[in-house]
Image (cartoon, helix red, strand yellow):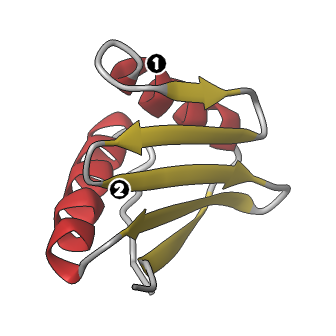
Amino acid sequence: MNPCKRSAFVPTRNPARYIGRLCRHFAHKLPVSFDELQGRIEFAFGLSTLQADDEGLTLHVESNNPADLEKLQHVVASHFERFAWQEALSLDWH
């Protein structure tokens, strides 16, 4: 079965800040790896990867089925938006 995938791009001058915040937050409970340019968070129901570039931050979510993808997308988005409140950023998934 092909994995279900979605991604979102957020223009920001601080992509490394959000990679660090998200990854450190989830590292207490989940396998996580990250540096200033990329992050990887392994959930039981899917995978989230984060990629920084000069324009901002791209977040990817991937899961084995649509229900888990929706759950993963919600978890990642809700945490990201909580950490990004100062810039009032939100995710628009594609």
Q: Quadrant of the N terminus?
A: bottom left
Q: Secondary structure at mark 1?
A: helix
In percent of the image, x 85 and y 56: which residue is there? 54
In percent of the image, x 54 and y 36: which residue is there? 18
Between marks 1 and 2 in the image, the one whose residue lies nearer the viewer:
2
Q: Is residue 92 visible?
A: yes
Q: Quadrant of residue 79?
A: top left
Q: Nearer the viewer, residue 49 or 18?
A: 49
Q: Nearer the viewer, residue 28 or 90?
A: 28
Can you give x and y, in whole percent of width and height, for residue 52 in the image? 74, 50
| Residue type, label 1 | Arg
Residue at the top extreme of this rendering: 28
To which residue does mark 1 refer? 24
Q: Around disc 2, counting alpha carbons within 10 Å, would you say few (fewer than 14), some (14 to 19), or many (20 or more)?
A: many
Up-down relation of residue 7 to residue 19 (above or below): below
Q: Is residue 84 visible?
A: no
Q: Quadrant of residue 91?
A: bottom left
In percent of the image, x 26 and y 40: which residue is there? 82
Can you give x and y, in whole percent of width and height, for residue 15 in the image? 66, 43
Can you give x and y, in whole percent of width and height, for residue 4 in the image? 39, 81
Up-down relation of residue 88 to residue 26 (above or below): below
Residue at the front extreme of this rendering: 1
| Residue type, label 2 | Gly
Q: Is 72 left or right of 51, judged from the image as shown?
A: left
Q: Secondary structure at mark 2?
A: strand
To which residue does mark 2 refer? 46
Q: Quadrant of the C terminus?
A: bottom left
